[in-house]
Amino acid sequence: MIKLDSKIPEGPLSQKWTRYKASVKLVNPANKKKLDIIVVGSGLSGAGASSALGELGYSVKTFCYQDSPRRAHSVAAQGGINAAKNYQNDGDSIYRLFYDMIKGGDYRAREANVYRAAEVSNFVIDHFTALGVPFARDYGGSLDTRSFGGVQVSRTFYAKGQTGQQCLLGCYSSLNRQIRKGNVVMYPRREMLDLVVIGGKARGIITRNLITGEIERHSAHAVVLATGGYGTIYYLSTLAVNSNASAAWKAHRKGAFFANPSFIQIHPTCVPQLNQFQSKLTLMSESLRNDGRIWVPKQKGDKRAANSIPEEERDYFLERRYPAFGNLVPRDVASRAVKERCDAGYGIGETGLAVNLDFRDSMKKQGKKAIENKYGNLFEMYKTITGINPYEEPMRIYPAGHYTMGGLWVDYDLMTSIPGLYAIGESNFSDHGANRLGASSLMQAAADGYFILPNTISNYLADEIRVPKIATDSAEFVETEKAVYERLNKLISIKGKQSASSFHKRLGKIMWDYCGMVRNENGLKKALTMINELKEEFWKDLNVPGAINELNMELEKAGRVADYFELAGLLVTDALNRTESCGAHFREEFQTPDGEALRNDDKFAYVAAWEYAGEGMPHILNKEELMFEEVEMKVRSYK
């Protein structure tokens, strides 16, 4: 077991980041031009980091698999972005945002990183406003806010139901400015297939041009992964179907520790699965729970139309169970409550796997126009998908895989266990513990990209100024490229009968059934066996048509699914190892008498940082003990 050094600065929590910035090593402006940085990913964290680093004068190369950076999955975030501005004068503060995140994450996050994210949040909102992001405003012209789950203040800034899209367009504009100035070179339609490590340091990547199939070598003094999460391991999720874990997993196989992989968030308000042919699910923003009330019939198996069920026969179960927070409890709590009602026979619809999200009372009080101004695009999207008009009858919603709190282990500098390799945004583990609060993902992604990484990366690069441009003809590049070719050839030469998607769908079903909202020892052990059997079948009966050196989406899918088989094994192993319930990791054996998560702080108040030990070898568990100086670990209560 390796002793992990998180490099948390000394001093009071509220002064750590300020002291860090005052003492961090700097790079002379003339030297910055000599240093190359690779950024993989172009969402809020990737585009933010690329534009900020380009603005500082570094030579940046940015890669994305989409045809344009503006198609990154940050575009799909709907509800809002948090900041501790306290515009409503409702008692908010940096400390309260920090505390809400620590508590919401069930005390499984690193204090210093979370406080820094809360501290930087206000700069993020100012920056996006300056970029022209059209946040909602009140009658007087001030920025408007609304509330989200797990908090009792209104700190979420929003642009109707398309906040992620508008923020990403702001990032895209700042990125384009640096591209035009020549500080950033953009490589769209590239997929990272491996990390190149030279002398123990990250020095480049191997990519595949997704249009031509050409394998390319790219070098740099540092590599930044901003590649998002691995929620599509469930196959059906709210993520884009091409979202994947491959870049992070390749880094893991090269030595980057993977932290808390079993911490995956299930979002409570999603459009239920409509048929067996779907390839993804659709998010309905958590912001809808501000005005929508969640309920089921009080009578089991009641199949009457929602509008025909009288008020006294409706069970507003979140309001009943959690009177202090009502419908705005955290996502893990709401998801399990919805599942419990459906499993008990109170679910609605043909499958019984849905509950009502009803806006009747809000429209009576505020008027239809007010609701339309807040959520109009979400209501239109819901009607397009389901054919149901939510202005006239309740939405039907059910939980779905959404966000991953786990990710690559990073220290306070956001550097992984490989020197020179950084992970930012959702691709790292650092800020959300065992459960993310709503509207904190855009906040963390933008904070990491625009305000944190540009400060911390100089601490490493200051010692790299004498290193010349990294040549791509070294033995390490040649060997890594050779391994990439061998794997692609292996995938394409199986010549079986089943598609990569069919295997992905079956893997996702295993993960959802046994390592989803609720887990137990027997189910997790069964999942491990089933994953290994399916993995063996995959490598015997996969069919990938076409060739390597051409446009080949089936080959792309096959590589990602192959990585998911390996990650699935680690995810289940981590869930088995953590014999407690915390946040989104809910083990049935460890719950309170009223069905809430039962933590074991004596044994599991640590970050599980898993180390790759080689093909076919069990992972090695390294632990970063979590120390709490400012908050006291206590049982979460939202009642």
Image (tube, rainbow, N blue to C red):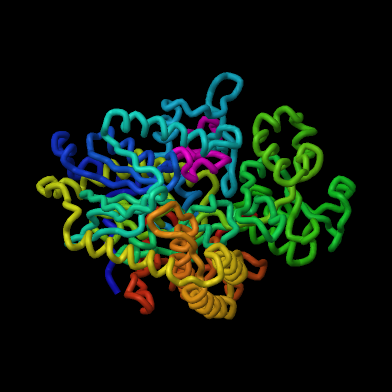
Q: Which residues are magenta?
A: 70-94
Question: Residue visible at 23% across and 65% down?
Answer: 479
Q: Residue at x 57, y 28 (%)?
A: 136
Residue 45: give x, y in percent of width and height: 40, 43
Q: Position of residue 329 (x, y in %)?
A: 62, 51
Residue 487, given in percent of the width and then of the height, sits at 37, 67
Q: Residue furthest top?
A: 140
Whether residue 329 is situated above or below residue 485 in the rendered picture: above
Judge from the rendering whether residue 407 lies leftward or rightward of residue 418; answer left or right. right
Residue toward you, 79 or 559: 559
Q: Is residue 92 magenta?
A: yes
Residue 52 lies in quadrant: top left
173 to the left or right of 473: right
Up-down relation of residue 532 to residue 264 (above or below)? below
What x and y, as percent, mark residue 92?
Answer: 50, 38
Tell me the quarter of the image containing the C terminus.
bottom right
| Number of callouts | 0
For this orientation, the residue located farthest to the left is 466
In terms of depth relative to the viewer, which is nearer, 332 or 277?
A: 277
Q: Would residue 628 be seen by someone viewing this image from the given angle?
A: no
Secondary structure mostly taken by the magenta-highlighted segment of the chain? loop
**Foreground: 244 or 403?**
244
* Residue at 55% over, 47% down: 438
Q: Residue furthest front?
A: 546
In the picture, the quarter occupied by the N terminus is bottom left
Q: Residue at x 15, y 49 (%)?
A: 464
Tell which of 32 and 550 is nearer to you: 550
- Report if residue 307 lies within the magenta region: no
Residue 55 seen in the figure: yes
